[in-house]
Amino acid sequence: MDLCYSLHNLGRPRGRMPRDKGGYPIVAGKCRMAEYQASILITQMQTVVEEAKLRAVNAEYLTAKLGEIPGIVPRRDYAGVTQKAFYFYGFRYQKEAFGGPSRDRFVAALSAEGVPASKGLGVIEDRPMNKEGLLEQAFASRIYKRVYPREKLLSYATENDCPVSDRLCEETVGFHQRLLLGTREDMDDIVKAVLKLHESRAKLAAQ
């Protein structure tokens, strides 16, 4: 049953399925939606355009305000982006500017202030996507071994070393899109919570 769950849920581990190779240890499909969930989603499509616009406006406001706080590096768009979609709003937490508290401590403190934060996409399973177990499985498969030379497969780990990406994964903090559906006052509350943690950074570092 655990294997069946993993096969229908992107290969994510559950129960007896291995977790030591990351959050996606096997190659699998995305077959998670049930009929009643699809029905609810169809209804929500009636408001999707307005909600997408609201998220974009609130995200732009947050980016401007959070960028004024030392140690917080907000997300930014590529030039030419005309439509923004937010499943997750993230920013970088640079602990040196906060006196050294770990990201886990910062996330816990931010959550205690009423902002349900997390470590972000790509690090939910505590490792970057380029180091997930499903890649190991793919490169060890018979198909890959027939298509690619052995030397190429062995050199993958070295060629795929991404220290900048690793640091991004280590610093990312954020929250899911539902918070971006709030009011301007709600966005100000998020900013105030982060600012409060920076102003009380000495106390936060001592905890």
Image (cartoon, helix red, strand yellow):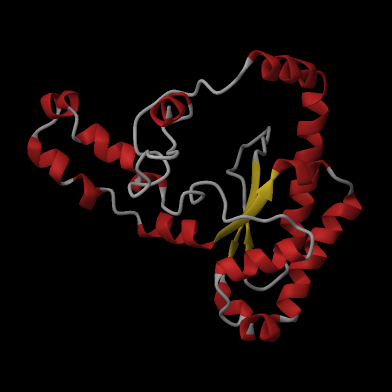
User: Viewed as shown, does residue 179 lie left or right of 205?
Assistant: right
- Quadrant location, the N terminus: top left
Specify the quadrant of the image occupied by residue 42: top right
Is residue 136 visible to us here?
Answer: yes
Instruction: State whether residue 72 appears in this view.
Output: no
Give the quarter of the image for residue 140: top left
Rendered residue at 78%/22% (across/down): 44
Q: Provide residue 25's location: percent of width, then percent of height.
A: 35, 39
Q: Up-down: is 31 above or below 136? A: above
Q: Is residue 129 above or below residue 101?
A: above
**Residue 40: x and y, percent?**
75, 19
Q: Residue drawn 89% across and 47% down? A: 183
Q: Is 62 left, or right, of 7 in this rendering?
A: right
**Foreground: 78 or 63?**
63
Quadrant including the C terminus: bottom right
Estimate the x, y position of residue 145 in percent, counting from the top left.
Answer: 13, 29
Drawn side of residue 68 relative to residue 186, left or right: left
Hey, which quadrant is residue 161 in on the image? bottom left
Picture residue at 44% right of the left edge, 36% below the top = 12
Nearest the viewer among 5 and 28 is 5
- Which residue is depicted at the point 85% across and 59% down? 188
Q: Position of residue 141 (x, y in %)?
A: 19, 29
Relative to 69, say whether 130 is above or below: above
